[in-house]
């Protein structure tokens, strides 16, 4: 079966432009996460979607960042007015979340989108 | 609040040697702990996880980790390194369902 897919794999943009990053989670997975991976910084949590619940946006670094998840499946992360410090790899993960509240779910990661802001 | 510290951004071993990647955590509740591996240009893949029960956890590719509450540690080991083990390894701790990841340790394997 297909894993988590992300597109594009690479994105180069100019400072000030808007970008959209797409994530297709594993079918049937109700939970979806976005992370940012900067060089030598590990993974920084951005946002979490669980079913029809309101998303946990506590990790979004500024109001230039937003995300949507349509129909409980595909998600789009949008960065407006990109800055050079936004350059990073953006990772998406999904999980079954059947053990919600017990914190044991395994996350399945996509290959990421490498964003470069010139 | 939860946090993870991975000691050493790079670990270098010879092929066939013991692999030891260190992870210490901080958690206000009994932790759930994870190790993930990331190969070049790929996403993270779960190696193993500790939830409850046996403190020695076995994972894929011959890796294992031991949860030591008294030391707040969850170090990853493998008896004999292979060239194919060269990758980035991340330790993570989860309290509320959203894990916190360490900064990662790059494992370098020399022939």
Image (cartoon, rainbow, N blue to C red):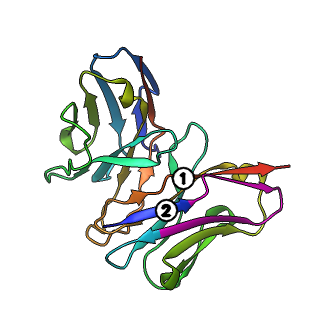
Q: Chain of mark 2?
A: B
Closer to the chain start, of discs 2 and 1, is 2
Q: Residue at x 50, y 52 (%)?
A: B103
Q: Nearer the viewer, mark 2 or mark 1?
A: 2
Q: Which residues are magenta?
A: B7-24
* Residue at point 48%, 83% (across, down): B69
Looking at the picture, tell me which residue is in the foreground, B35 or A76. B35
- Kindly report the distance in space between the C-alpha atoms of the residues bearing marks 2 and 1: 9 Å
Q: Is residue B36 left or right of residue B27?
A: right
Residue at the spot of label 1 = B104
Mark 2, residue position: B5
Give me the residue at 36% from left, 30% from top.
A86
From the top left corner, tell me how far across and down residue B57 is, in percent: 57, 76
Above or below: residue A46 compared with residue A65:
below
Between residues B100 and A11, which one lies in front from this camera angle? B100
Check the picture and name the quadrant holding the N terminus of chain B: bottom left
Query: Residue B16: where, in percent of width, then height?
Result: 83, 61
Nearer to us in this view, B86 or A54: B86
- Dividing the picture into quadrants, the one containing residue A61 is top left
**Location of residue B100 (image quadrant):** bottom left
């Amino acid at each position: 079966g297909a894993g988590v897919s992300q597109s594009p794999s690479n994105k180069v943009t100019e400072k000030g432009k808007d970008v959209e990053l797409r994530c297709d989670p594993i079918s049937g997975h109700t939970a979806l996460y976005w992370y940012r991976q900067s060089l030598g910084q590990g993974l920084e949590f951005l946002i979490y979607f669980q079913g029809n619940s309101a998303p946990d946006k506590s990790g979004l670094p500024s109001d230039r960042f937003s995300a949507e998840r349509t129909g409980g499946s595909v998600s789009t992360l949008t960065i407006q007015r990109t800055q050079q410090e936004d350059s990073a790899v953006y990772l998406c993960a999904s999980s079954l979340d059947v053990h919600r509240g017990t914190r044991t779910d395994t996350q399945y990661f996509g290959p990421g989108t490498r964003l470069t802001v010139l | 609040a939860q946090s993870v510290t991975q000691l050493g951004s790079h670990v270098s071993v010879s092929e066939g040697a013991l692999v030891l990647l260190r992870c210490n955590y901080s958690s206000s509740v009994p932790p759930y702990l994870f190790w993930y591996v990331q190969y070049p240009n790929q996403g993270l893949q779960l190696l193993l996880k500790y939830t409850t029960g046996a403190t020695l956890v076995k994972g894929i590719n011959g890796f294992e980790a031991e949860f030591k509450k008294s030391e707040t540690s969850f170090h990853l080991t493998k008896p004999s390194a292979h060239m194919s083990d060269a990758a980035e390894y991340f330790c993570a701790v989860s309290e509320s369902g959203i894990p916190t990841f360490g900064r990662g340790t790059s494992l370098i394997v020399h022939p």
